[in-house]
Amino acid sequence: MQKIDLHIHTVHSDSQLTVAEVAKLAKRKHVIAGICDLLSPYHKMFEETAFDDYVADVRSHDLLLGAEYCIGETIPVGADRLARLDYLEGGLHALKVDGEKYFFWGAGMPEDVDAFMTGYMESILSALAEDPMDVIAHPTYLPGALADRYDDIWDERRCGELWAAAAERGVAAEISGRWMVPRPRQIGLALEAGVAFALGSDAHRRPELFDLNYPLRMVEEFRIPEDRIFLPERKI
């Protein structure tokens, strides 16, 4: 199977990589590459002009065009512009608990883990039901303070709810090279639920680009067939 990396960030959001640089390296390494910059009020692409510039830049190269929006935040462009994308990823990056917003890659966590996970599941399931996403970015990722409780938190009940909703909507679950989630047990549960998978490095720097060691290992370990690997069609 040819390498597919659908989660690559560039200077259009929070990366050091240029679109031209990614295109050149993808061609050299024979990788099907998708640019998936953040469509977010917290990053550069928070309004229509920036989005249009992004689309023009990516479309000038032999690359797939995606974007990653922040689940729980208003997508800053309309449906007509989203329709120009080859695919849309949704990632949960922050969560409001008891009136306070916690960013997953920031400091601090609420003491009530059950309340946090209730909010987590509500946000993800609502997005799966209502948002136009094709892929859940880094699903099951937990903030560092909860990482050692990963397997207890992502038990069969929570995974069952998440994967059933994803399968019903036809939304793929990303296997993340950078964050190494979902973990093997959770991938097995997703596979049993009929979920498709997307592969992504979540690269922000050149050393991270096309780092698909973990996703490809999981594909091999679980013998995930090619027809369960998400690959969008290029619209233009």
Image (spheres, grey):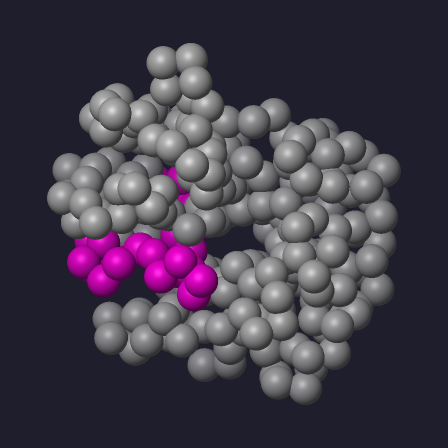
Q: Is residue 47 above or below residue 30?
A: above
Q: Is residue 186 left or right of residue 226?
A: left
Question: Is residue 185 part of the magenta span, yes or no?
Answer: yes
Q: Is residue 107 above or below residue 36?
A: above
The spot of residue 61 in percent (x, y) is 79, 68
What residue is rendered at 23% in x and 29% in y?
Answer: 113
Instruction: Specify the farthest residue to the top.
Output: 99
The spot of residue 72 in percent (x, y) is 50, 27
Q: Is residue 113 left or right of residue 181?
A: left
What residue is rendered at 68% in x and 40% in y?
Answer: 43
Span shown in magenta: 168-189
Residue 83 appears in the picture as rendered: yes
Q: Toward the viewer: 82 or 52?
A: 52
Instruction: Specify the farthest residue to the bottom.
Output: 28
Question: Is residue 124 part of the magenta span, yes or no?
Answer: no
Q: Is residue 30 above or below residue 86?
A: below
